[in-house]
């Protein structure tokens, strides 16, 4: 991680790619009985997103997270928390491109989580609060300036969470789960200074309530 935060762009890029390769190798071992280091394989990329001053390096780091999600969906297991943590950090980034990339990854991540990969002991609802936090970070990030598309896309992720929650027989009856989703939407609709975002939040909230 220290090398990935180097001021030398060549060293930093090489280090981030090395972290990706290491994560690939570790996650390929996750099929072995008793392997539980998925989070350790992914967490360094989140640290790079937190610590690097280089936009290019952070863009590469979030691209590596996307690669891991795409290539190892069924092997991530307990590493989903590290994935969502990295996405939350990226969603709070000062670079509009990093923010947009994080939102692009959130949708397939949320979908994959709620498929409930068999045998991993981890369904999406165990990560519900973390998913919501990551989406809220993207909505509230002002780094995209007048471009409201990323914030709007992040709000639409709440619909994905609602649909997935509604399909879960074991979790849909829990009021706390619904309140965890509806509460932030209501707060955004009530207090966001951007009228378009406040209106979109209200629309998503009412649609989610009436359809679920």
Image (tube, rainbow, N blue to C red):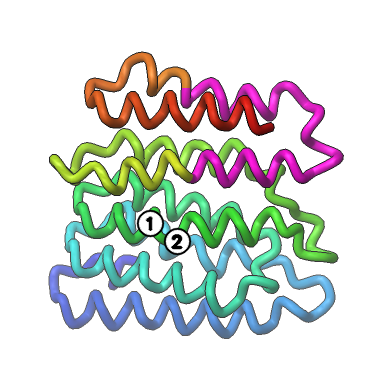
Rendered view: 37 above or below 10: above
Q: Which residue is mark 2?
A: 105
| Disc 1 element | helix
Q: Predominant secondary structure in magenta?
A: helix
Residue at image coords 70%, 40%: 165
Give me the C-alpha separation between circle 1 and circle 2.
Answer: 5 Å
Q: Is residue 212 left or right of residue 41?
A: right
Residue 102 has which mark? 1
Find out whether the residues at labels 1 and 2 contact each other: C-beta distance under 8 Å: yes
Residue 163 at what x, y percent from top left?
A: 65, 43
Residue at image coords 76%, 79%: 31
The N terminus is located in which quarter? bottom left
Rendered view: 204 above or below 110: above
Residue 89 has which mark? none
Residue at image coords 32%, 78%: 15
Q: Is residue 20 left or right of residue 51?
A: right
Tell me where the magenta segment starts and ends, as one range.
157-185
Rendered view: 176 above or below 4: above
Rendered view: 41 above or below 80: below
């Amino acid at each position: 991680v220290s090398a990935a935060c180097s001021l030398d762009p060549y060293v930093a890029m090489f280090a981030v790619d090395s972290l990706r390769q290491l994560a690939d190798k570790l996650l390929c071992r996750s099929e072995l009985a008793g392997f539980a280091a998925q989070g350790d394989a992914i967490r360094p990329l989140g640290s790079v997103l937190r610590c690097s001053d280089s936009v290019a390096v952070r863009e590469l780091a979030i691209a590596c997270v996307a690669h891991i999600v795409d290539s190892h969906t069924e092997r991530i297991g307990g590493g989903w928390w590290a994935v969502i943590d990295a996405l939350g950090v990226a969603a709070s980034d000062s670079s509009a491109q990093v923010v947009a990339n994080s939102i692009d990854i959130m949708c397939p991540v949320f979908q994959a989580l709620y498929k409930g990969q068999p045998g991993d002991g981890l369904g999406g609802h165990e990560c519900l609060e973390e998913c919501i936090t990551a989406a809220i970070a993207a909505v509230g990030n002002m780094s995209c300036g007048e471009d409201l598309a990323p914030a709007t896309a992040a709000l639409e992720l709440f619909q994905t969470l609602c649909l997935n929650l509604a399909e879960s027989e074991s979790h849909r009856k829990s009021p706390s789960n619904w309140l965890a989703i509806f509460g932030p939407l209501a707060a955004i609709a009530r207090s966001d200074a951007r009228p378009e975002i406040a209106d979109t939040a209200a629309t998503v909230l009412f649609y989610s309530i009436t359809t679920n």
